[in-house]
Structure formats: C-alpha cells, structure tokens
Amino acid sequence: MFDALNERLSTVFDRLTGRGVLTEKDVDEAMREVRLALLEADVALPVVKDFIARAKERATGEEVIRSVKPADQVIKITYDGLVEMLGGGEDGQAPAEGLNLNATPPVVILMAGLQGSGKTTTAGKLALRLTKMDRKKVMMASLDVYRPAAQHQLAMLGEQTEVAVLPVIEGQRPADITRRALTAAKLQGFDVLILDTAGRTTIDEAMMAEAAEIAAIAKPTETLLVADSLTGQDAVRTARAFHERLPLTGLILTRADGDARGGAMLSMRAVTGLPIKFLGSGEKLDALDVFDARRVAGRILGQGDIVALVEKASADFDQAQAERMAKKLAKGKFDLDDLYNQLQQMKKMGGLEGIMGLLPGVQKMKAQIAEAGINDAMITRQQAIIGSMTKLERAKPDILNASRKRRVAAGSGVQVQEINRVLKQHRQMADAVKAMSKGGGKGFAQFAQMMGMGGGGGMGGGRPSMEQLKAMGGGKLPPMPDMDPAELEAKLRQLQQQGGMPGLGGGGLPGLGGGLPGFPPKKN
C-alpha cells in the first residue's frame, strides 16, 4: 500500500543525507517534496497542511541546525509527524488501542459499514482473534436479511473458525434477531456477541435508521466501522457520515495489503477523530492485525516491521515440534524434511515477499529483487522438488545420483540444475547446523542469548520480552538503513555465521542459501 509513498520519501531523504549542514532553504525544499508525496498518496489536504506546518516548525529549530546529522533529525521529525497523524499521540508513545472488553458479559460488538467493505469476513476474523488470543467465548449473529446468503456466509465462517453462530430463522426482522441474539448469548454464557449489520452500496436513510435502532436495542460496548482502504477518501467521507448517526468507537480498514495509495489510512484519524483499531491484511481468517501507529510509520519510511515478523513467527508456535527440532539440531542433524518444514513455516508467515517486506531497507532493493526472480513461486518450486523425493532420499540426500535427480526433476517439473541448487543450499544449512552443534550445542545457546531469548530474560518458552521487541524497532525509530546490495548481503552473511534467523533454522532465510538471493557474492 505504501510502496509509492515510501519511494518518494526515500528519494527526498537521500538528497539530504550526506550534507553537513542544512539551511532553511534545504528544509523548505524537502518539506515541499514531502507535501507532494502525501498529496499524491491521496492524503486529505487539511491533514497535509497541518502536518507540513508542524514539521517545518520543528525542522527549522536549533536542535536540527546544531545536530551532528541534521538529515537524520529531519527524518525523525517526519517519522514523529506520521505517528501523530496516525493517532500515536504527540509524543509518539500512545499505545495501540484494542477493543474495550471491560463490561458485563456479553460484551456487544456492532459491525457497521457499506456493502462490499468486508464486514462479514471481518466479523469472522475478529471472532477468531478473540477466541484464540483473548480466550473469549464468542457468538456471532447476522442481521443482514437483505443480501442473498449473507446469513449463511456468517454460518460458514463460524464453522471454519469454530465459533458459535446464532441459528437463522427465515423472515425475522433485524431488530428481532438482535433481541434473540442478546437473550441466547446471556443464557449460554458467552463473553462476546458480534452483531453483523446489513450494508448498502451507498449511504441511505433506511440503513442508518436501522443501524441506530439496533444500537439502541443492543447498547454495544464497541461500534466498529469497517471501511475499504481501496476507496481512498471515500472511506473517510463514509466514516464521517456514519459517525454522525452512530456512536462509533473505532475503525477497521480492510484490504490494507492492496495497491491503494494509503491516503485513507493516513487521513482517517485526523479527519474523524476515531482510532483505527485493526487492519485486514489478507483473505485468510487470521489476517487481522492490531493497528500500531509507530509500526505503520516505520513501514512508510522503509524501516520494516521486525515486531510484526516476530509475531508472525510465534503465532503458530508449536512447542512440541520446536523441542523435537531443537533436539535434532543439537545433534547436528538437518535433513531435507527439516528444510521443507522451514519453507512451510515461511509460507505461514506470509511468504518470502511478505517477510522481506517487513525487513528494514529491503524496499530500496525491490527492483533488484524482482529482476532476480525472488518470489513465493520459488518456495513452491523448492517444496515440489523435496516432495518429489522418496523418504530415504530426503533423509540421506547424498544418495541422489544423476538418475534419481532426473526422476525428481520430472516429478517436480523443473530442470536438474534446480535440484542441484536446492541440494547445495541444504548442504550449506546442514554444515552451519553441524558447526553450531559442536560442544554440546553451545553455539545454539550463545545465539539464543545474543538474540535476548535465553537466560530467563524473555517470555515463557524462551521468546523475547515486549521490551526487547520494542528495542528491535516497535517502540522507537531504528536507524535509517542506507546500504547497497553488497552491504546488505554482508549483514545477511554475518547473520548466517551466527546461526540464521530464530525459528527459521540455521543459515539465513530458509530456501535462500547464504546471503541475499539473486546477488552473487563478491569475488576476491
């Protein structure tokens, strides 16, 4: 969503970097470019004017003029302004606003919005999140009696998420369904009741009157407007119109993973005064992220989002499987089945493109990565190659002779050269695991301690604490990366020597071998 804006802002800041002293003229030119970038990203004009006025005031102060690196200080000022615009508070320390569940059960959450904004799917996502993350007993009820199969769609989502759904009685009015849902939720001891209201293609009086009637009956603790990010400033106008008739408490923006310019998200808080609580970032039912202004601002400025990466890695954390893997690695064993599992884990975390999009500095190298053919199809091909091998071949790759490789290539639909590449990168990872396992696995222990995941400093199960995660980029602005491909490759090689990324096996990113794929190592 923010690729174009990130590219424009990076160009602006690259011009400032390297200058010893910034004059007022330099700052004016930079702010003019930032203003144009925000307007092109479809940010509301009053919001842009306010942002530039505050940024100019801060950027022309003595703190910047006397700063050791004035360009970095301007970047920091822009970051703080973005955080403030997105609802992070003037000091940038306001926490992400979650749902208010501190009420007498059942806590009622009312979902409102236009037709096609993703209300029903978001209701299912929210129910799943409350069930898994907050351990709440949730019931959903569909009040949409107009759209064909809307109630049955919610019932299907209930089956997929294993969340209770109020049985459908044909011919009931939305107000009557609301009363029945409240009674059923109270009698059956549910903690949360999610009401999915009907939408229209445009805002009309009938829809607003019905939503107001439902709100009067249900007395919801949270009234959330679901808006489509792809509609741009129309989403802002929709939010303002709904807020005039309904006591909205927050917003959920869907399709945040789309190719919209991001103006709706940047304008929404400033125009409506309502907090953005969640972002729908995909079609899967677990693709609902808590909105955090600091992390979104970091992504806009190309800082990545290390906290989101760690959260994705731990979302489907299987303690038993991790212990089995740890015992195997401690013995220096890493076969092709393990590589396959690591590739599968990468897919669960959003695929190669999703992971690299969260890494700092990678946005600057997007063109080179695309030219090198680095994408999720590469992971799928590698899984197909490993899946075409026999159990014995996956356990003992050394037995793969020329005829066996030809058979695997035919079974997976690739050339023999690709088989050799997969075997080579597996050998590199296996060698790294073997080296770290020497001395009773001290290499793994040292790496875990280095990452802040050992010695009792982390959370349960050896995970990093929230303070450590914030230090990795969630709680403050990390240094702006300014590396060329060779420098980034050197960093990844260093990471490989230290054992790779936690939770992804040894040797860098799984399926990629050492360093950044597509960029050949420097020749001595």
Image (spheres, rainbow, N blue to C red):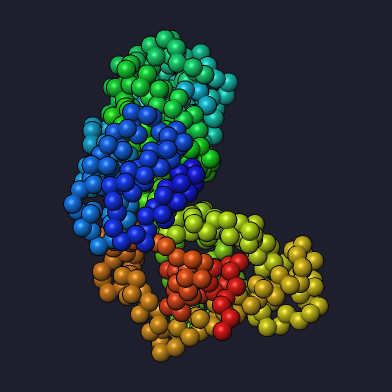
Residue 388: percent from the left, percent from the top?
Answer: 72, 67
Instruction: Point out the residue furthest to the top here.
Output: 205
The residue nearer to you, when weighing 180 against 61, is 61
Q: In this orientation, does residue 458 appear?
A: yes
The residue nearer to you, when weighing 363 against 195, is 363
For the point 28% across and 66% down, which residue is it?
458
Quarter residue 97 falls in: top left
Residue 271: percent from the left, percent from the top?
Answer: 32, 28
Q: Is residue 449 above or below residue 90?
A: below
The quadrant of the picture occupied by the C terminus is bottom right
The residue nearer to you, when weighing 395 against 265, is 265
Left or right: where 303 falls relative to 51: right
Residue 192: percent from the left, percent from the top?
Answer: 33, 34
Q: Is residue 450 above or below residue 320?
A: below
Left or right: where 110 falls relative to 172: left
Residue 444: percent from the left, percent from the top?
Answer: 40, 79
The residue nearer to you, when weighing 444 against 298, is 298
For the point 76% across and 81% down, which residue is it?
401
Q: In this orientation, does residue 511 appear?
A: no
For the point 42% across and 55% down, which residue is it?
14
For the point 33% across and 21% down, which residue is it?
243
